[in-house]
Image (spheres, coloured by chain):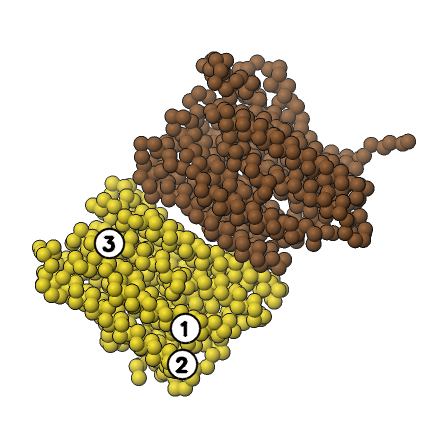
Amino acid sequence: MNYSPPAIDYVAIAPMIVIFGAAIVSVLVEAFTPRSVRRYLQLLIVFGSLIAAAALIVINASTRVVTAGQAIVIDGPALVLQGAIVIIALLGAALMAERSIDSVGDAFASRVSSLPGSEEEKQFTQRGYLQTEIWPLTLFAVLGMMLFVTSNDLLIMFIGLEIMSLPLYLMTGMARRRRLLSQEAALKYFLLGAFSSAFFLYGAALVYGYAGSITFPEIAQTVTSKPGESLVLMIGLGMVLIGLLFKVGAVPFHQWVPDVYQGAPTAVTGFMAATVKIAAFGALLRILYVAFGGVRWDWEPIIWIIATLTMLVGSILAVVQSDIKRMLAYSSVAQAGFILIGVAAASAAGIASTMFYLIAYGFTTIGAFAIITMVRDAGGEATNLATWSGIGRKSPVVASAFAVFMLALAGIPLTSGFVGKFGVFAAAIEAGMVWLVIVGVVASLIAAFFYVRVIVVMFFAQPTDQTASVVVPSAFTTVALAAGAAVTVILGVVPQPVLDLVANADVFIR
Amino acid sequence: MSAFPWLTTLGLLPLIGSIVVALLPKSKPTLAKQVSLVVSGAVLALTIAMALQFDGASTQPFQFVESYPWIPSFGISYSVGVDGIGLVLIALAATLVPIVILAGWRDIEGDQESEGSVKGYFALILALEALMIGVFAATDVFLFYVFFEVMLIPVYFMIGRYGGPQRSYAAIKFLLYSLLGGLFMLASLIGLYVVSARELGSGTFDFLSLVGLEMDPNTQKMLFLGFFFAFAIKAPLWPFHTWLPDAAAQSKPGTSVLLIGVLDKVGTFGMIRYCLPIFPAASEFYAPVVIGMALIGIFYGAYVALTAQDMRRLFAYSSMSHFGFIALGIFVFTSSGQSGSVVYMVAHGLSTAALFLTAGFLMSRRRDSALIADYGGVNKVAPVLAGFFLVAALSSLALPGLVSFVGEFLVLLGAFERYLWVGALGTLGIVITAAYVLRLYQKSMTGPANPSIEGMTDLKGREITALVPIAALSITLGLYPAPLLNVINPAVDWTMNTISAVDPEPVVSSDGSQP
């Protein structure tokens, strides 16, 4: 039997190759270079490769190609989402690179392998060990995300999913403080994540059984040409959806979100909250629109129900949280619901508005978590909402920035969150889903309550003995925070360039 | 038409002023106040200059028009312009802001309850002024919505940081109520955009393009409800009023004046500007419901005011009753009713300002108590204060010769022209108004002097300076309302033509003289 290797368009996938190469080099640096230079080398590799990847994506901007034997597709949505992932990962990496906030060093455990509370751990901390293992993991996670949004078949999508997820499980468990919480979160994330991956894989197998192919275009062809309903297809699709909806944190697959967001080091939380959402929604959009566009009447109601549940449950549970990281976790669940409205619209406007929302949400989220890393008391980060009381009086600038992020998440005009919400609501009404939008409106109001509550606590309440203080960070966090705030405001006031960008990239190619 | 960007300048001036004030050092509160006063004075001067350029005979629906694309993807533009209604409401805002600044000169310092800085309060007032001008000037519905929503933020901080003991609760109640309305309006707004995209080829938010848009009746009704709901909360009409008394009772007098005197007018302004011309059929369909709500509001508000113990709550409920009149005038679809409503908006702004400010001066002399029972016989110790209080009270009950009478009379006339019984019921409302206003005056100002007010000082120069312009305007426009009506009537006629409503005979003469 003749085997001819598939032709690969190396230029089109150059951004991924760069990140992949950098990740490998990063592992080697970790293994073979002396401790003293590791950090500098790693930072050089990470920031250098991310910037290079971003530049290559820009250079590739007009590329529309299916390559690697139909396995990978580089089209408008893929480029936009890859670009967003890479740029937001840059900001996330800046948060992780911060070393002047925590007096002990950085936010990560000196030796992740040491037992929490053990003598060994104490010694490592006393000797001031700082680790740099986070960097290769970050690069692999970014690579997974980039592959996730460009995959054109079920298997590559699964591989992307795993490359993205495995490093994130580890990164979740690396917190320096409250290590038990962090490790518990990591284990929970890993177990549930593995479970959901299994769902995805089993679903993929069923879909293959039905369609006889794993590539999206061929699945699409079979789906539209085979007459009649198919139970195998529906079960397969359902299971694939479970795997993806787990990653976006949609109800009822959201249970991991609060624990993981709370337990993970805050810089990692910010990084993954922003980028995983982009990647997973990118994959969800592609699989639904490209492979299963022919049965949209079957999956649309499911997305409606999931979106409704996600918005309402996320918003309502966020109201009762007293920990700011958990609150933002439930908020991210609610936001996933709003984004699902755009997905449900099943139109070009739906794709464009979903992408805009993801970009806006990513920058706002990074900024918000950047501030959480800075608000500290003796025990480390002060995440209890009560300790934020009166912070607006002590540090008005930082508190105002946080207020901007909260207003953006609440969708107040002149912030990016409003334009995002407007876009998905408009797409949904155009598609005739008035009721979904009304649910969205009600959920927005509930959500506004807890976003505004943070502002109340920061500005209206008196500072108490327990009020945390805001630590002045180094340039890393400052830049990430400033970029997050700037994009949040700019996308709210002059969104047109980015709207044009997503509107010119709203077509999936096959 | 002058090419000078009047409205943009008018909006930018207080905005820049607000930023300047916010950046002043905290140690110089007086400088912050002076700068605020100068800026608001300049805005007023500019407004007057603009008003003098306004062409009452123009056939264009809007004057001082500016338009630039903003977010072309969604058909959104930065478009501003005013008709007569927008102009008088901008003028109302521009008049009240310097008065509020002057009257609130000492409201913030020495106040243990508030924690915000002095400059912060005045910066917020100026920011709010910019947004108020924007909301009345916007001719792009989306732009209007943006101002409508963003306006909440300074008010929220004004209540929440500078109010009374329950300020946080009042602020969040206000915010959530308003946001709820705003979000429903947003849903309608998007719906309107989608309809316009379907009808006109490309979606737009330009007000004039949206007027006369073909819509099927059901869509129109749904979209109308979204808008109306937001406006009814803002105004507020019964039964969406519960946030108002709390907000009024917890705010500084200046905040209350701007909130009830100007901001709430955005609700009634929105009804006449957006609900009627864009959704004429739906407006007609829902008119009986709105009129019912208005009548209930008139009586319910007046009844609660009759039993209120707290002066500020009394004013809030009385405002609710007055908003009933304003909404009534709008939804009877007669030109006299609508002209009357607009005059009433101005009049109510003035009388609310007079009431809240005078009451504020009174309360500042007695440890901030707002209980009516804590006062009595004030006219013996502080006759000037009592005098201004009387003028304010009489303006509230619409005594002939004061501008509120012109508004109320025209509204009732309009109501009578359309539905006899509505007019008759509305007239009954006046009687209760007279009862609670006079009861308030009698209990607090006349009779034997309450021991607790002994040694109360009378109004001082600054306080009198703040009140005189309001009283003067009330009386002047009451005796000679023609300038006001000449500006308002063309705008009302335009609205009436747009919704092809015809006045029942006889029509009130449009030269403004009272029959």
Of residues A262 and B509, the one nearer the viewer is: A262
What is the x, y in percent for residue A258? 52, 36
What is the x, y in percent for residue A29? 61, 19
Verify CB contact (< 8 Å) between mark 3 and mark 2. no
- Say whether disc 3 or disc 2 marks the residue closer to the N-terminus: 3
Q: Mark 2 lies on which chain?
A: B
Q: Which chain carries label 3?
A: B
Say the numbered circle drawn on residue B311.
Answer: none
Q: Name the residue under label 3.
A: B104
What's the residue type where badge 3 is placed?
Gly
Verify CB contact (< 8 Å) between mark 1 and mark 2. yes
Q: Quadrant of residue B495?
A: bottom left
- Say whether disc 1 or disc 3 marks the residue closer to the N-terminus: 3
Foreground disc of the pair 3, 2 = 2
- Give me the chain that's yellow: B
Q: Mark 1 points at which residue?
A: B291
What is the x, y in percent for residue A204? 73, 39
Q: Name the residue under label 2.
A: B419
Q: Is A390 placed above or below A168 here?
A: below
Of residues A182 and B112, the one nearer the viewer is: A182
What is the x, y in percent for residue A243? 66, 39
What's the residue type where badge 2 is placed?
Tyr
At 48% from the left and 13% from the top, the residue drawn is A119
Q: Residues within 10 Å of mark 2 (few under 14, many from 20)?
A: few
Q: How far apart are marks 1 and 2 (CA)?
A: 11 Å
Q: How far apart are marks 3 and 2 (CA)?
A: 44 Å
Label 2: which secondary element:
loop
> On the rendered structure, is B351 left or right of A502?
left
Of residues A445 and A407, the one nearer the viewer is: A445
At 47% from the left and 39% from the top, the residue drawn is A327
Q: Distance between the residues labelled 1 and 3?
A: 37 Å
